Amino acid sequence: MPHLARVPPHDQGGFGTFIIPSERMEMSFEERAALCALNRIFGFEPKTGLRLIEALGGASAVFKEPEEVLRELGACSRVKYAAQIAVSAFESAAMELERLGRDGCRFIGIGESGYPPLLMECEDPPLGLYYKGESAPEEVFGGLPQVAVVGTRSVTGYGRDWCQRIVEAMSRSTIKPLVVSGLALGVDVTAHRAALEAGIPTVAVMATGIDELYPSRNRDVGERIAGTSGCALVTDYPPGVEAVKLNFIRRNRIIAGICRATILVESKIKGGGMMTARLASSYGRDVYALPGRIDDPFSQGCNLLIRENLAEQIGDLGELVSKLGLGRSGIRLKDDFGAEVTAFYQDRLPEGECEDIVRLAMAVKGHRGISVDELCSKLKWTYSHTSRLVTTLECDGFISVDLLQHCHAG
């Protein structure tokens, strides 16, 4: 393993002194197997494992110097881990690496070429990552800027619509990003699907072993990610580990650590998306949040981060893309919405009807979540006239209408 050097914390949020490799190089099978074994042992306390590796000069040395290991471990940790640090653990890891290769997967040790560079800047990086993808990890993590898109599993129509719009805006930027999320229901899978449909790469960081796609409802997306060039499945959990609540907490730090920026689409005050956003902020990364109604529980987390100045409010998508460092987005600015609707319909509809549809579009734009009945009252139109124009706008992609007949503008 490359020499481990102590590095001062990140200027914008490091917690203290932490360890990263001072150079990146090809790693021997013995060192990788040792890291794989130590990742199993110290998965929830990676800093303890990193301290041992640094003290002994390498991961493989941990299994050759048991007395030194015991001296380095504190009294409580000595009792907890001493029995696990054995030659048998190393041998089991070596056999696991061989099985992974036969199954089209691999283990990337910290410091090895292909380990996500930004993750090594965190104070608690995993000792290694299990990886499955068509492309080499060096290609996936070594080129495009990485952006996390996360949020609640109980995504609303508003959140789903804006998640898709955000990913689409990034896909049309000058510099294409790598979209990172957690393969969960709701915002996560929406972000993955949107990225795949838009033709930009996406990585799913899982809270299970690399051999377990969870939840089963998202299996098709996971398999598509694993089989698409530039995309990958990633986890620090060994094969055979199933989904339990605690695993998602550990998973979230990897999503935040891999990425230069995190976008929180929707979240309650407490939730995995909120945790990921707060972790990203603590790592000194940029955080953006989609604002919502103050009485909407699924927007309260985003609104709170904005009030606490831990996240910047998302307003204009072109501005967001620029702040992410992705160049220009090639999408319309929010102030051009009325002009775009006018230009689209002025040769398609009679003059009076064109004026009505522009009025309707701007009413929806100014009152997110307004119902068709409320539009009738506001514009003093019949339900049939209003409903017909709403349907026209929705079919042409200017607005979306959820199951409760609430309208949302682009």
Image (cartoon, rainbow, N blue to C red):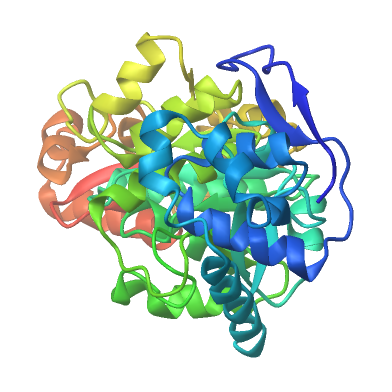
Quarter holding the C terminus? top left
In-image side of 86 versus 398 (left or right)? right
In-image side of 214 versus 4 (left or right)? left
In-image side of 352 versus 210 (left or right)? left
Q: Is residue 367 above or below residue 406?
A: above
Please state the total of marks drawn on the protein image: 0
The residue located at (48%, 58%) in the rendering is 40
Q: Does any portion of residue 291 appear in the rendered image?
A: yes
Q: Nearer the viewer, residue 242 or 390?
A: 242
Q: Position of residue 143 (x, y in %)?
A: 82, 51
Q: Nearer the viewer, residue 283 or 26?
A: 26
The residue located at (53%, 45%) in the rendering is 254
The residue located at (65%, 76%) in the rendering is 228
Q: Is residue 314 above or below residue 177?
A: above
The residue located at (69%, 12%) in the rendering is 11
Q: Position of residue 378 (x, y in %)?
A: 17, 29
Q: Nearer the viewer, residue 231 or 193?
A: 231
Q: Position of residue 7 (x, y in %)?
A: 75, 21
Q: Position of residue 179 (x, y in %)?
A: 60, 52
Quadrant in the picture for residue 199: bottom right
